[in-house]
Image (cartoon, helix red, strand yellow):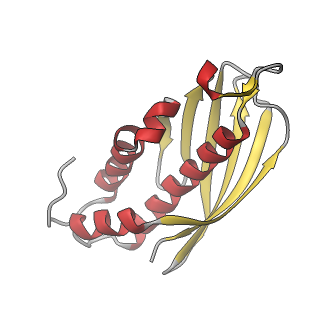
């Protein structure tokens, strides 16, 4: 997606975020990340179980770092949407520049059960977006709807 000086609408900003997270971030491509749902108030991403993502070979479960990473990237995506909502009417260039400066300040992960399953869905929603910081809530479920992990993320957006 080209970045130009024209103002953006929220639907184009959401699609820009989809492109960034699915295609432009090499680590996300390595995870096999698919954006399942991308709306103004909620994001859901999917990864499929792959041998390279296993952390405990005896239990065949996801590596804890993969779980934390997916929670973090889902939280970052929904924080980016919150930022886009705040910048409505600004230029696409400004939005792209502000998104490129976003980063994780704090991430809390509670691992509730081993990450076993054919695939995993991680959803995220915004708890609050301020001028400088956004706070999000994330949950990861497996294909059987078992809750694998939950998290809270804080992101710099200003």
Instruction: Tell me residue 133's x, y (percent).
Output: 55, 75
Instruction: Tell me residue 129's x, y (percent).
Output: 55, 72
Residue displayed at 60% across by 24% down: 52
Q: Quadrant of the C terminus?
A: bottom left
Residue displayed at 43% across by 34% down: 29
Q: Quadrant of residue 121?
A: top right
151 and 105: which is toward the camera: 105
* Relative vertical location of residue 133 with respect to residue 108 in this rendering, above or below: below
Residue displayed at 56% across by 48% down: 74
72 to the left or right of 22? right
Instruction: Tell me residue 97's x, y (percent).
Output: 30, 67
Q: Quadrant of residue 10?
A: bottom left
138 to the left or right of 114? left
* Relative vertical location of residue 139 with respect to residue 55 in this rendering, above or below: below
Residue displayed at 70% across by 40% down: 140
* Residue ranking furthest to the bottom: 131
Q: Quadrant of residue 137?
A: bottom right
* Residue 50 visible in rendering: no
Instruction: Tell me residue 111's x, y (percent).
Output: 81, 44
83 and 9: which is toward the camera: 83
* Residue 26 visible in rendering: yes
Q: How many marks?
A: 0
149 to the left or right of 81? right
């Amino acid at each position: 997606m080209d970045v130009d000086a024209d103002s953006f609408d929220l639907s184009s900003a959401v699609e820009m975020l989809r492109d960034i997270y699915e295609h432009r971030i090499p680590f996300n491509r390595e995870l096999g990340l698919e954006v399942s749902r991308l709306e103004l108030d909620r994001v859901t991403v999917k990864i499929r179980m792959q041998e390279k993502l296993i952390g405990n070979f005896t239990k065949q479960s996801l590596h804890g770092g993969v779980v934390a990473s997916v929670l973090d990237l889902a939280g970052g995506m929904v924080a980016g949407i919150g930022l886009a909502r705040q910048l409505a009417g600004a230029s696409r260039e400004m939005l792209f520049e502000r998104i490129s400066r976003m980063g994780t300040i704090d991430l809390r992960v509670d691992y509730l059960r081993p990450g076993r399953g054919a695939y995993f869905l991680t959803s995220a929603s915004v708890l609050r977006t301020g001028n400088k910081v956004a706070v999000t809530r994330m949950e990861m479920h497996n294909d059987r709807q078992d809750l694998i992990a939950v998290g809270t993320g804080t992101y710099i957006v200003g």
